[in-house]
Image (cartoon, rainbow, N blue to C red):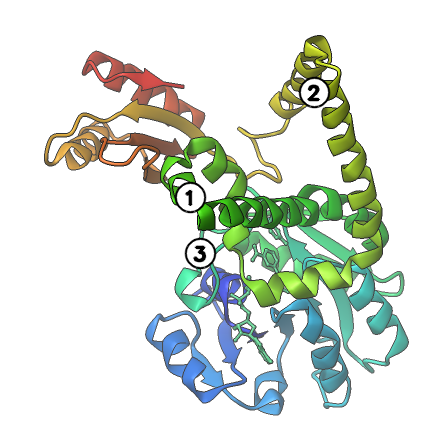
Amino acid sequence: MKIAIFGVGLIGGSLALCFKGKPGITVVGHAHLPELVEPMLSRGVVDTATLSVEEAAEDADFIFLCVPVGLLEHYLELLSRLPLKAGCIITDVGSTKSSIAKKAAEISLHNAYFIGGHPMAGSERSGVKAASALLFENAYYVLSPAEDVPEEAYGSLERLLKYTGAQVVRVQPDMHDDIVGAISHLPHIIAAALVNQVRKHNDENPLYRTLAAGGFRDITRIASSDPIVWRDILLSNRDVLLGLLEEWNGQIERFTHLLRTQDGEGIADEFWTAGNFRSELPERRKGVIVSTFDLYIDVPDTPGIIGRIAMELGNHSINLSNMQIIESREDVPGILRLSFRQERDWERAKVLLDSMSYKVVV
Ligand SMILES: NC(=O)c1ccc[n+]([C@@H]2O[C@H](COP(=O)([O-])OP(=O)(O)OC[C@H]3O[C@@H](n4cnc5c(N)ncnc54)[C@H](O)[C@@H]3O)[C@@H](O)[C@H]2O)c1
Ligand SMILES: O=C(O)C(=O)C[C@]1(C(=O)O)C=C[C@@H](O)C=C1
């Protein structure tokens, strides 16, 4: 089985890593610039790489379009002019689904089928260097097939995607864009706007950046996302976002009013309501928020402490999925965040670290 990936960046590279080396599968990466070929080969993300669209697409059973949203229609159009293998399935990973679905309905793909796709996992990082075979594990993976796509074709893409560890969910393109506009695109706008607001204050007084702590970092991580990828996503979901921004202005006006009228009860109520809804998000199960079980430890400033903690967990066969120092205070040893994929590992780590007299916060 030949899988061609157009755009071997964060998402394309991560998909390639999920498929490469699986029985009977060959992964071919397409690059639009010669300098992109070497990194995808040296990282071992693909079996072969080519600069030729024709060569990548020839005889492919599956074609994944993993380029920025603004280029998806161009690539779909290019493919429609090529002699693709009969039954070839073309899919994309774009963060919007309506515009590409519309394009697919307008053109003829002859013996090939188009099934829109969107893995609900990602990162603020970009490029093949950030690709990971584990990126999609436990995430949802949206598929939006056109009505005329045979169930058999849908089923074979669904089966292939099992290699990602994600859970496939079928959603109509318009509904997808409404929902993802609210839970992904609007948050990216808010994060960028908030960082830029603080940046302006920081130009006058650099103490802003110095004091920026966990809250600011937590809400603004995604402001570091790739500008071109996000330019394309926002423009492609423009109408939905204009509506959401109007709603957002209403939220801001509500807080303005509560502050003006010194309505403490109203302010607390906003946080009660928000906290209750947020606590119901599927954070510890499969979901839009990648499932991890986190522990926080106040790390004492002694050399080798992080290695010792990792070793102790390893000695007790507790699987750690991630470790991060949260540098919220300059010159002060930070908080160590330990993430686990399994709730059982998280519980065992808590008991172990408690017994070692670390200050553990859940
Ligand atoms: N970043 C995320 O969190 C995320 C999550 C889900 C889906 N997506 C979607 O995945 C797609 C890729 O995003 P990414 O985060 O992997 O970005 P990326 O920048 O890591 O990768 C983009 C890829 O497109 C290629 N590319 C750029 N310009 C090109 C051009 N002119 N012609 C051909 N190829 C070109 C790049 O070389 C790169 O391989 C986007 O459509 C995005 O909406 C992103
Ligand atoms: O975790 C992140 O950094 C992401 O931005 C991932 C995220 C999201 O907003 O949740 C971003 C874009 C997608 O299309 C899907 C997922």
Mark in front: 2 vs 3: 2
Q: Amino acid at mark 3?
A: Ala
- Distance from label 1 to label 3 (Cα)? 42 Å
- Which residue bears the numbered disc 3? 133
Q: Which residue is drawn at the image coordinates 53% and 56% (left, top)?
A: 225
Quarter-of-image position of residue 34: bottom left
Q: Residues within 10 Å of mark 3 (few under 14, many from 20)?
A: some
Q: Which residue is drawn at the image coordinates 18% and 16% (left, top)?
A: 356
Q: Residues within 10 Å of mark 2 (few under 14, many from 20)?
A: few
Q: Amino acid at mark 1?
A: Asn
> Image check: 304 left or right of 314?
left
> Extreme top residue here?
265
Q: Which residue is drawn at the image coordinates 42% and 69% (left, top)?
A: 45
Mark in front: 1 vs 2: 1
> Which residue is nearer to you in this view: 101 or 244?
244
Q: In the drawing, what numbered circle is on residue 259? A: 2
Q: Which residue is drawn at the image coordinates 57% and 52% (left, top)?
A: 162
> Which residue is nearer to you in this view: 312 or 235?
235
Q: Are marks 1 and 2 in contact (CB under 8 Å)?
A: no
- Relative to 316, say whether 4 is above or below: below
Quarter-of-image position of residue 281: top right
